[in-house]
Image (cartoon, grey):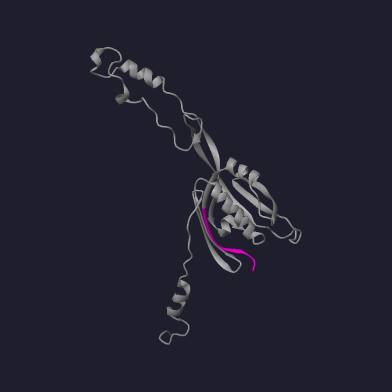
C-alpha cells in the first residue's frame, strides 16, 4: 500500500529567510532528489523533484504552498529581531527624578522632562517577510505523486518552526498514524473514529420524492 495523507491542517508561520535556510540544510527523503522553490507574487511554492525516473515529467509532483506576508520586527538590546517592540524605560512623568532641576523636587521639572523625551533612543525596526503554511491538505500539500515523502519534509519544517501547529492523519503500511507538532515540538496524538454525520442524516432525512404525504 502506498503511504498517503488523509487529513492535514497547518498553521505554520516562519520568516522567509528561515525557510530558505531550512531547505539548504534539510536531509530529504530518498524518494526526493531535490526541491524547486518558486515565488509567484505573494505565493511560495516548493515542489518535489523525483529521485527516480519512474515518474513521468508530465506528472505533477507534490508541492508545499505558502502565502507570504510582511510583519514589522524590532531590534532588542541583544541585537536580535523580535516581533514585540522592547519596553521603553525612563519615560513618562513617573520616571522623572525628584532631584532634577530646582524647585525642591516637589513638582515635575519641565526642562528635564523635555530633555529626557528628546534623548529617548530610537528603536530599530524593519519589515520582515513570513511564509505562512496555513490551511488544509489541499491548500498546503498538493498533488499525489511523492505526497507522503513531501509530507515528511513538512513535518521536519514544523519541527524547525518556532510558531504554529501541524496536525495530520496518514496511512503507513496499512496502519493509520496521527501526527501533531506544536511550536516545533512533537506532541501526543490519537485517532478517534466517529460516526459520519452525513450518513446519519441520510438515514433519518425525509425522502421527498417517495413521500406519500406530498403531492
Give the left or right position of residue 164, taking residue 154 as reference: left
User: Residue 83: where, in percent of width, then height?
Assistant: 47, 38
Q: Nearer the viewer, residue 211 or 135?
A: 135
Q: Which residues are magenta?
A: 1-10
- Residue at image position (62%, 64%) is 3
Q: Nearer the viewer, residue 100 or 156?
A: 156
Write down the quadrant of residue 85 in the picture: top left
User: Residue 191: where, in percent of width, then height?
Assistant: 49, 65
User: Residue 183: where, in percent of width, then height?
Assistant: 49, 48
Write down the quadrant of residue 5 in the picture: bottom right
Does residue 132 appear in the picture of this structure? no
Mainly helix, strand or loop, the magenta region?
A: strand
- Residue at image position (48%, 33%) is 74
Residue positioned most to the right: 53
> In which quadrant is the N terminus drawn?
bottom right
User: Residue 156: where, in percent of width, then height?
Assistant: 58, 51
Give the left or right position of residue 157, taking residue 214 as reference: right
Q: Is residue 7 magenta?
A: yes
Give the left or right position of residue 163, taking residue 20 as reference: left
Does residue 8 appear in the picture of this structure? yes
Q: Is residue 111 above or below residue 40?
A: above
- Residue at image position (48%, 55%) is 187
Q: Is residue 74 above or below residue 185?
A: above
> In which quadrant is the C terminus drawn?
bottom left
Amino acid at each position: 500500500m502506498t503511504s498517503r495523507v488523509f487529513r492535514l491542517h497547518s498553521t505554520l508561520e516562519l520568516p522567509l529567510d528561515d525557510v530558505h535556510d531550512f531547505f539548504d540544510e534539510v536531509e530529504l527523503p530518498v524518494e526526493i532528489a531535490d526541491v524547486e522553490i518558486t515565488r509567484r507574487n505573494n505565493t511560495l511554492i516548493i515542489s518535489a523533484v523525483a529521485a527516480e525516473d519512474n515518474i513521468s515529467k508530465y506528472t505533477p509532483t507534490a508541492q508545499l504552498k505558502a502565502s507570504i506576508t510582511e510583519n514589522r520586527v524590532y531590534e532588542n538590546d541583544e541585537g536580535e529581531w523580535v516581533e514585540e517592540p522592547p519596553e521603553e524605560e525612563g519615560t513618562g512623568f513617573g520616571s522623572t527624578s525628584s532631584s532634577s532641576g530646582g524647585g525642591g523636587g516637589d513638582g515635575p521639572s519641565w526642562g528635564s522632562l523635555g530633555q529626557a523625551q528628546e534623548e529617548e533612543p530610537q528603536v530599530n525596526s524593519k519589515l520582515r517577510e513570513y511564509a505562512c503554511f496555513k490551511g488544509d491538505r489541499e491548500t498546503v500539500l498538493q498533488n499525489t505523486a511523492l505526497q507522503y515523502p513531501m509530507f515528511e519534509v513538512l513535518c521536519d519544517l514544523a519541527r524547525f518552526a518556532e510558531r504554529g501547529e501541524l496536525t495530520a492523519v496518514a496511512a503507513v503500511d496499512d496502519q493509520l498514524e496521527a501526527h501533531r507538532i506544536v511550536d516545533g515540538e512533537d506532541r501526543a496524538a490519537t485517532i478517534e473514529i466517529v460516526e459520519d454525520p452525513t450518513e446519519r442524516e441520510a438515514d433519518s432525512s425525509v425522502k421527498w420524492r417517495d413521500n406519500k404525504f406530498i403531492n
